[in-house]
Image (cartoon, coloured by chain):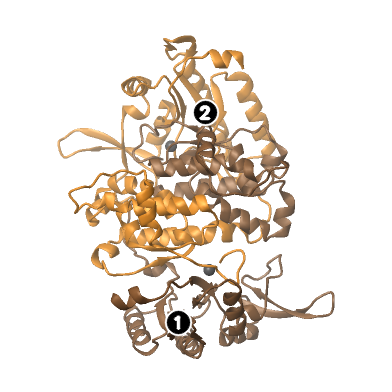
Chain colours: A orange, B brown
Amino acid sequence: MSSVSKLPKLLVDIHTHLYLPRYASLLRTRTTAPRILSRTTISGQSEERLLILDNEPSGGRPVGPQYWDRDEKLKFMDKHGIDISIVSTANPWLDFLPYPEALSLAKDLNTDLESYCVTSPALASSPSLHRLYALGLLPLVPNAPSDALASFVRDLAANHPNIRGIIMVGENVWGEQDNGHVLPLALGFPFETTAAVTRLILAGTLDRHPDLRILLAHAAGALPALSSRLASCIVHDPRVAARLQHDARYYLGRLYYDAVAYGSAELEFVSATVGRAHRFDSSSPEVTGKTAGNAEDKERGSARIMFGTDHPFFPAY
Amino acid sequence: MSSVSKLPKLLVDIHTHLYLPRYASLLRTRTTAPRILSRTTISGQSEERLLILDNEPSGGRPVGPQYWDRDEKLKFMDKHGIDISIVSTANPWLDFLPYPEALSLAKDLNTDLESYCVTSPALASSPSLHRLYALGLLPLVPNAPSDALASFVRDLAANHPNIRGIIMVGENVWGEQDNGHVLPLALGFPFETTAAVTRLILAGTLDRHPDLRILLAHAAGALPALSSRLASCIVHDPRVAARLQHDARYYLGRLYYDAVAYGSAELEFVSATVGRAHRFDSSSPEVTGKTAGNAEDKERGSARIMFGTDHPFFPAY
Ligand SMILES: [Zn+2]
Ligand SMILES: [Zn+2]
């Protein structure tokens, strides 16, 4: 503990990604998604795109050195004053491989990761530290034997000192008990409400029908929590963005909510996200794009939240 | 507007349910789920249970007069000082019927609903109002022709003055545009994270492994927003509740989060739900079960939230 407390304050980026060169090379050899393909742009330049699913209308996501070149990562860190990054691999991980190939590739990629980190520059202010550490990969695909995974983790911990954790994707490791109705009730219903109203927003329905009054069950589920993320995803998808008159967060102020949210922190947060909506009105001269939600916002938001009991159901349907 | 402002302050329950007698009768005639079946309890009494899915391990949800008897609804309202309830039908609605049957049943149920409301007692403080109003049903099932739905709504509005809205369940009405990557990115990833960590909590893993350190991407998606709902669903499922040492909200204080949540209101809320976790520690003499999350809680919660950029992805993967 004492050595920890003596560390200078460091800005550490815990969520930052790379596609290792070995991984990018594999994706380039593939003829079905996921794959990286090359194409020639209108201006005659060659560019690479990562296709996660076949037939993506967008033609995939452009990828370049910022995804695999360590110098690009360090440049990004320097630009933003980030001392240390804990890098991890990204979607689609090893999901598309059968277990034997996933196992062999995971081993190689973890060796690459270790080398990526251990040969990275020392941190000027604490030269015993590197500037790059990593989260390792497991061959977590269907049919992976759990005892093999356990020994994989032990080996990783023993032989890769700069890999400081592992990333866990894939459902099969997160508990397979019978949970009765808990998951569909606690998560399923709110997820469905969130997806439904998000589709409605994305369709431009609230722009075309400003007088439409919609009351959302269970305080709109996860919509308030994900509305800023939604806004960012829309901004980065020009076809969808072009369809909408406002930032996604604006539409939360056009909807009504019931108060079946189970707690006062939850309701206060819904009020804040509903009451801040006017800050995202693109037709107003005062668009501020502020996400905070002050006391006045919460008051305004509360006015759109209605009392509800969900009688006779407990818990709520 | 002036007539509205003259109304006394009323407590209106906007989210409250019933299964109409006609609907319950139909469910009793069915031999596959959804259905209502009778069984004899150990004490020799007969009870009815609603089975939403075949082979539910719980044997279904016990149902009784509180689900269909209007006097029971009024008793509940009186007990809690609720002046007016806007009742709506509940899961599984008409989802299990082919369109022609859904259409015919929806008409009959809306007639029942209108009668349920119009013959309900007048409100003592405003005798021109009834104590019960309703949200109507649409035959919103796959293959429902959209022009038929539109005329159904017009008819409902014209002939059912006490039906003051409609409930909209079913995905097909919420927009079918191609939204590119927006839905999987904005909602899919956070939903998966939420479901995965919820499974882990429900499996008792955090009880058995108190030293396990888990960092959740995207500030745990919808987990903070749904944690109080999750806690309620667990309390009402004795098999799952018996498996866990603490209220679900306690475990949020055992996890770590990145700050990739896109807004300051969002992060403040995550801090509040993480920092209030100790109030749900069943081994502490001071379990308060308070859900608010004060300034001190937010400070405590922030200590478990870590900086992250998601470089080079924008929006975040
Ligand atoms: Zn309900
Ligand atoms: Zn990411």
Q: Position of residue A198 (x, y in %)?
A: 37, 58
Q: Along the line of sight, which residue is nearer the eye, A268 or B10?
A: B10
Seen at 49% across and 52% down, the residue is A266
Disc 2 element = strand
Q: Which residue is mark 2?
A: A135
Give me the disc on residue B99: 1
Q: Compared to B45, does A239 lie above or below?
A: above
Disc 1 element = helix
Q: Is mark 2 within 8 Å of ligand 2?
A: no
Q: Along the line of sight, which residue is nearer the eye, B161 or B56?
A: B161
Indicate the chain on which mark 1 is placed: B
Amino acid type shown at disc 2: Leu
Residue farthest to the left, as pictured: A43
Q: Along the line of sight, which residue is nearer the eye, A175 or A309?
A: A309
Q: Compared to B78, does A15 lie above or below?
A: above
Indicate the chain on which mark 2 is placed: A
Q: Along the line of sight, which residue is nearer the eye, B264 or A61?
A: B264
Q: Position of residue B135 (x, y in %)?
A: 44, 78
Q: Is residue B252 visible?
A: yes
Residue farthest to the right, as pictured: B43
Q: Compared to B145, does A209 lie above or below?
A: above
Q: Position of residue B170 (x, y in %)?
A: 44, 69
Is A202 displayed left or right of B166 in the figure? left
Q: Position of residue B7 (x, y in %)?
A: 38, 76
Q: Is residue A143 visible?
A: no
Q: On the rendered image, what quadrant is the N terminus of chain B found in?
A: bottom left
